[in-house]
Image: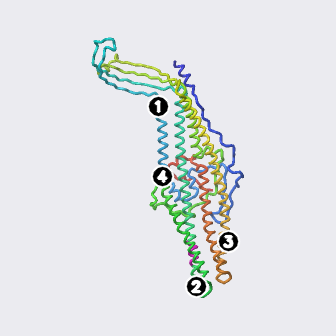
Amino acid sequence: MLSLVYSLSGCTVGPEYRTPAPPATDSYTPKALPEHTVSSPGATGLAQQFKAGGELPAQWWTLYRCEPLDALIREALSNSPNIAAASAALRQASENLRAQTGIDLYPAIDVKLNATREKLNGTTLGQPSLNRILSLYNASVNVSYNLDLFGAARHELEALGAQVDFQNLQLQGTYLALSANIVTAAVREASLREQIDATERIAADEETQLGVLRKQLEFGGVGRVAVLSQETLLAQTRATLPPLRQSLDRARHQLAVLAGKPPSDNSVPEFRLSMFTLPQTLPVALPSSLVRQRPDILAAEALLRQASAQVGVATANMYPQLTLSANYGPQSLTPAGMLKYADMIWNIGAGLTQPIFNGGQLSAKKRAAEAAFDEANGQYRQTILLAFEDVADTLRALDHDAAALAAQTEAWRAASSSLELTRGQFRAGGVSYLALLDAQRQYQQTIVNLTQARAARYADTAALFEALGGGWWSDAARIQTGQADSDINPQ
């Protein structure tokens, strides 16, 4: 009998999961990326170098060399409700796995105590005169064990293990999204502050110019139209400030909430673009490495592994189920009699269940599980493609950002020189007021565009780090504690 049981226990049915091969490509973009981006004059216009196959640090945001940003992210990792919820989901999945492991891999042992009072009818025993009221006491140890003959329990535990992996990767993805959102919001706030400051300076210059025009109007040097045009320009400049300030308020509120605080909290640091250092070296994981590192890809694979295991469960349920059971303990008509060894009773048995006819239920469930696996497989492959698209977009964005900053820097320099020259010529009567007005408008637009171009490089660098998975695998334990990594040095 035992030899038969052992031979059957090796008859595991259902698919054996194997990790799908990654797409056969070694590049994210149709054209090879340059070794580095273009540079432009100024500290924020330095070139960034792409390092193929490089590794990101777990705390990648420290590459910006901004201590207030580091402190805010550490605080957010400790206080975020989203992280607390993801951690709780991981604990729940882990406990579910432990519970099912106890059910599937170990025998169930229970101790039972029973006391009953009943009337015995002798007619059922062929003794009509035997009618007694008696008490019956029983204490027993019951053992039962379901033999996993065809791997249903193993596949079920595999599915629960995949769910644990999925929740862990969801947690890592939450860390990554939170840190990236904070960096992006901080850069947005810094950019808005720069734009507001620049707009206020422009408005002050235009107000000064308006005062000069009004003096000239008094002496007949300019016409009323020139003054009205300058007043219109000043009003238009001032009209851009409320939307910028509203956007700044929203960025501040977002930072507070991301840090796990109410929007009214005023302890969130204020950010300026000058507080950030642009990372000069950009590690870029190879496509074959990205599929083993990015949390959303690994989470999709965990769901695929879970779906594969469910196919195994559905397949095994179509085969016989064998249960072993045993009971041992005393049974007596009096409590004292339960202490006598002679009153011991026992039984041992085995039960075999083989599905014969169930209206096609089991085969339909197997086909449904196979369809769910095909769905998970399609979603997994789509997740990889979207991840590659994400990396490709950010890589090209960084290259274009650098070119845009170089162009905006040249435009700003030209507009600044043109405005200064035009102002001098206007004072000397060499040009009309319309020429000065046009120069002012060009300068105003270029200074705002320059600020936005500078901020785009910081934001898209963070987007690249997020697209590459954030480096959580290199130091997953420490990122969860929010500890600073003093060993990271930007190139």
Residue 464 seen in render: yes
Magenta-highlighted residues: 200-207
Indicate which label's residue lies in the foreground, 2 or 3. Answer: 2
- Image-based side of 274 in relation to 136, left or right: right
What color scheme is it?
A: rainbow
Q: Earlier in the sequence, mark 1 or mark 3?
A: 1
- Identify the residue at the far bottom of this view: 219
Q: Earlier in the sequence, mark 1 or mark 2?
A: 1
- Identify the residue at the far right of this view: 31
Q: Earlier in the sequence, mark 4 or mark 1?
A: 4
Circle 3 is placed at which residue position?
414
Could you say where residue 356 lies in the image, as x and y percent from the top left?
53, 23
Could you say where residue 331 lies in the image, as x and y percent from the top left?
34, 20
Marks 4 and 2 in Cβ contact (< 8 Å)? no
CA–CA distance between discs 4 and 1?
35 Å
> Judging from the image, what secondary structure is the residue with disc 2 in?
helix
Residue 376's disc is none
Residue 205 seen in render: no
Given the image, on which type of amino acid does mark 1 rest? Ile
Circle 1 is placed at which residue position?
103
